[in-house]
Image (cartoon, rainbow, N blue to C red):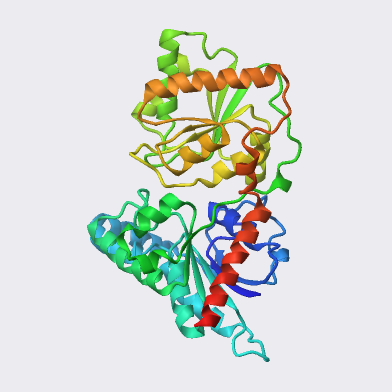
Amino acid sequence: MNILAISFAYPPTALPRSIQAARLLAGLDANVTLVCANWTDAPLDTTIYPDADKQIQMVERVKFGSSGLQRLVSRILYRASRSAWNRLYRNPDQYRSWVKPVLDRVSELPQNETETERFDCLVSFGQPFSCHLIGRELKKRMRLPWIAYFSDPWVDNQFNGYDLHSRSLNLKLERSVVESADLVLMNSEETIDLVFARYDERSKAKARVLPHAYDEGLYGDRSSADGDTIVIRHIGEFYGPRSPVPLLRAIIGTDSVDDHRFDGVSFELVGDHETGPELEDLASHPATRNVIFKKRIPYLESLNLMNRSDGLLLIDAPGESSVFLPSKLIDYIGSERPIFGITPPGTADRLIRQLGGATANPNDTAAIRTRLACFIDMIKDRKNLRSSEPWGEQSIRETFDRKAVQKQFLGFVNECVMNEMRE
């Protein structure tokens, strides 16, 4: 099987999508030609699959970057006219200028002399969703069956911050992609139900679930935190409505009732976070003295920290529900450590409970207090027993193993190709 893949992010670019693309494509039982970005301003993390290029047949890196003048113009336009800025930079995103160079580069790729087309299938990875605009155009030009891997929702993503105009633009773009693609992959059934609520049954029939994966081989020695202190970690960034505030409120509330309840417990929040008056006030409260904020660390080190934790925290943005399947939650599952989720009803909440973990809504401080205390009691019991048993329902964990997800992905590629042949 010869696959042409379009993914803006790929190692060593320090983006979650780099991990996802490398974990799915590197070492895949197929011939993969990947077109990704040579991003001149990219944050880098050389611990993310350093051999990823060697495990793919061909990697073509297409330059993306902006000059100081272009960045200045963007800032001025943002302040002068938000609607004009949205039209340029939210249609669908600030990476749209990468589309034409990629199309030009693909047209230069060598063709198989014995076949009409070199590739059997085309796969585009979003985010950024500009990758799907490339996929849409390549499907027309090369007449290939096309899989659009959305991962997270496009228009329905609360973190995108669209105004009415940019939302309207992106609805049209999303519809053109959904209607042109042969299959659309998303991370959960909840995401499919949310996005395809505005489409007909024929379009929804293209949707398939492909989750994130963890890589068993990256975790190394699985040992609990040293010493008597119970170490519970959150690993990942806080931004926008996703904040540690619900955790801090619960800790302060518990302390007002029992100021010894969290003695011997350390909460470590590892990763960048936005500050604000409420967060600063809560973080300086005497009751949160056992909450430690640490800076962002390289990816491989983050897996090692998971391994050396007694428990792991997932904290999502408040809301009535959440369709997101955070990639760090899947890495948590791979570490085999107990998980407590402060998350609305939805995908992550369901998965954590299926594994045997505990959850509470970010808006329900009382529930967070009660269930967090029970979670810590469970960890104490495990630590006292010196249990070395993997935590979490094994049958659930296995579905997110890298090899299982790669096999599932190849199944979708074969389905897409076979459907094209029948037509």
The quadrant in which the N terminus is found is: bottom right
Quadrant of the rendered image containing residue 335? top right
Residue at position x 32%, y 66% from top?
A: 200
Q: Is residue 148 above or below residue 79?
A: below
Q: Position of residue 2 (x, y in %)?
A: 64, 76
Quadrant of the rendered image containing residue 270? top right
Q: In this view, does 340 lie above or below 155?
A: above
Residue at position x 36%, y 72% from top?
A: 176
Front position in the image: 290 or 115: 115
As drawn, is 358 to the left or to the right of 203? right
Q: Position of residue 18 (x, y in %)?
A: 58, 56
Q: Residue furthest right?
A: 221
Front position in the image: 74 or 85: 85
Front position in the image: 339 or 421: 421
Looking at the image, can residue 304 be seen?
yes
Residue at position x 37%, y 52% from top?
A: 157
Looking at the image, can residue 271 be seen?
no
Q: Where is residue 110 in the image (x, y as percent from the top left)?
A: 64, 85
Q: Is residue 199 above or below residue 370?
A: below
Q: Where is residue 130 in the image (x, y as percent from the top left)?
A: 43, 67
Residue at position x 60%, y 54% from top?
A: 19
Quadrant of the rendered image containing residue 136? bottom left
